[in-house]
Amino acid sequence: MVNELSGKVAIVTGGASGIGRGIVERFHGEGAKVVIADIQDDLGETLAAELGGMAVYHHTDVSDQAHIAELIAATVRKFGALDVMVNNAGRSSPLKRGLFNEDFEEFDSVMRINVLGVMAGTRDAARYMAEHGGGSIINMSSIGGILAGGGVTSYRASKAAVIQFTKSAAIELAQWEIRVNCIAPGNIPTPLLQTAASDEDRERLEKFEARIRQQMRDDRPLKREGTPDDVAEATLYFATDRSRYVTGTVLPVDGGTVAGKVMPPRKPKQDG
């Protein structure tokens, strides 16, 4: 398919780097006008300049509801519409040596960015979409919000909250032809994990991350590596009319990790 988003206007929060950048580039390649919302001004402005007049950067701190409201208003002023809202911005919580050592010092920040940012972004986009024929809202969770596990407990809790909120919003907003869906990436190399390292852990981050990534590979049925492009492709599906009868869903993009335990490899059985 080519130009599936021609004539559409989209916002991607956290769009200056990582998965967000992959989504911005995919949407732009499909003909959308894209607003890159982020706090990384240099990266965001550079990306917008690379993409040209069909993309603009807007400084947005999603933990601040006033910023989100202004983002929606600025998008409509610039491009005259809003068809797709991708609430992608997020952060991890610090790595600690077990729950007993967790002080939840950054709990408020994690929840304001990962949960409040998604909730306010959904609400404000829906207010516009309800009066203009509907639209698509896509919220970014994580397999950490589906699978329980030790470590980064605030992050896991925040991503689980995104899933429940998405389903609830989908039910409420369906009457206005607003679809709300959720993507749960897993083992996609991005800078996010680096933000989880405390000063004490930072020197050992490379070795730690390599060990975690290897464990994720071992737990993943598909052995190919996931990329931001894989998440962008799934996001594109939810943004287009191909998913016009799909709402309230959670799509893991994780190589099958949440499906179950990996089976031991075996050779295909041959007759005779």
Image: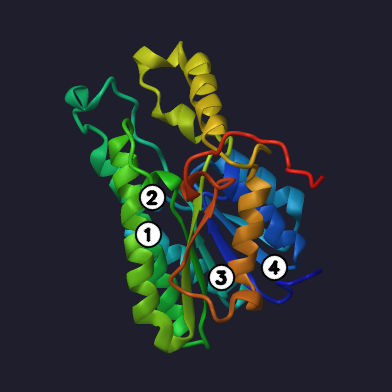
- Tell me the CA gap for discs 1 and 2: 8 Å
Give 148 or 76, whichever is nearer the viewer: 148
Identify the residue shown where x is 60% and y is 61%: 235
Where, by quadrant of the figure, is residue 166 drawn?
Answer: bottom left
Q: Amino acid at mark 4?
A: Ala
Give 41 or 36, whichever is nearer the viewer: 36
- Tell me the CA gap for discs 4 and 3: 10 Å
**Contact (Cβ within 8 Å) of mark 1 with mark 2:** yes
Residue holding disc 2: 146
Residue 157 percent coordinates (x, y): 29, 46
At mark 2, the secondary structure is: loop
Where, by quadrant of the figure, is residue 199 drawn?
Answer: top left
**Is label 3 or label 2 in front?**
2
Compared to residue 9, the image places residue 223 above or below, namely above
- Tell me the CA gap for discs 3 and 2: 25 Å
Label ID, residue 62? none
At mark 3, the secondary structure is: strand
Sooner in the amino-acid sequence: mark 2 or mark 4: 4
At mark 1, the secondary structure is: helix
At mark 4, the secondary structure is: loop
